[in-house]
Amino acid sequence: MPNSFTMEYDLAGRTAKEIYAKVSQVKTIGKMTLDFEQPEETRMIYVQPTTVWKDGFKALVVFHDHEGGSVHVAIRSQCNRSMVIFDGGQNEKNCVAIRNAIAAALK
């Protein structure tokens, strides 16, 4: 497992700003908290701080409108420390948790 993981997919039937507005209301996903928002760029960052016992993570979430009426969603989770070579699959789990939170926020 590398020290980062990227997940990309498309959502139909909404605009990037609509999705961003709903997802930005989700302040906590698992142990990650919403740390940084850029509404004009429809992107946000969730973080899990580094502690003495565990390495932290940050996850960038970006929404882009496509011409066909769909929204491209890109989620990238990475370890806070660049020295981490293997993350044990945690970055992928973070991306899946964020994807699931986005789906729940849009219901």
Image (cartoon, rainbow, N blue to C red):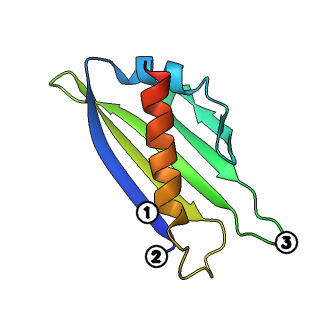
Q: Are marks 3 and 1 in contact (CB under 8 Å)?
A: no
In the picture of the structure, the residue carrying the numbered disc 2 is 2
x, y percentage for residue 12?
Answer: 24, 24
| Residue 42 seen by the camera | no
x, y percentage for residue 102?
Answer: 46, 32
Q: Which amino acid type is marked by label 2?
A: Pro
In the picture of the structure, the residue carrying the numbered disc 3 is 52
Tell me which numbered mark, 2 or 3, is placed earlier along the sequence. Answer: 2
Q: Residue at x 69, y 63 (%)?
A: 56
Q: Choose top left, top right, bottom left or bottom right for residue 103.
A: top left
> Where is the C terminus found, in terms of image quarters?
top left
Q: Are marks 1 and 2 in contact (CB under 8 Å)?
A: yes
Numbered disc 1: secondary structure: strand
Relative to 103, 38 lies left or right: right
Q: Which amino acid type is marked by label 3?
A: Val
In whole angstroms, how far apart are the C-alphas of marks 1 and 2?
7 Å
In the picture of the structure, the residue carrying the numbered disc 1 is 5
Local crowd at mark 3 within 10 Å, few (<14), some, or many (≥20)?
few
> Where is the N terminus found, in terms of image quarters?
bottom left
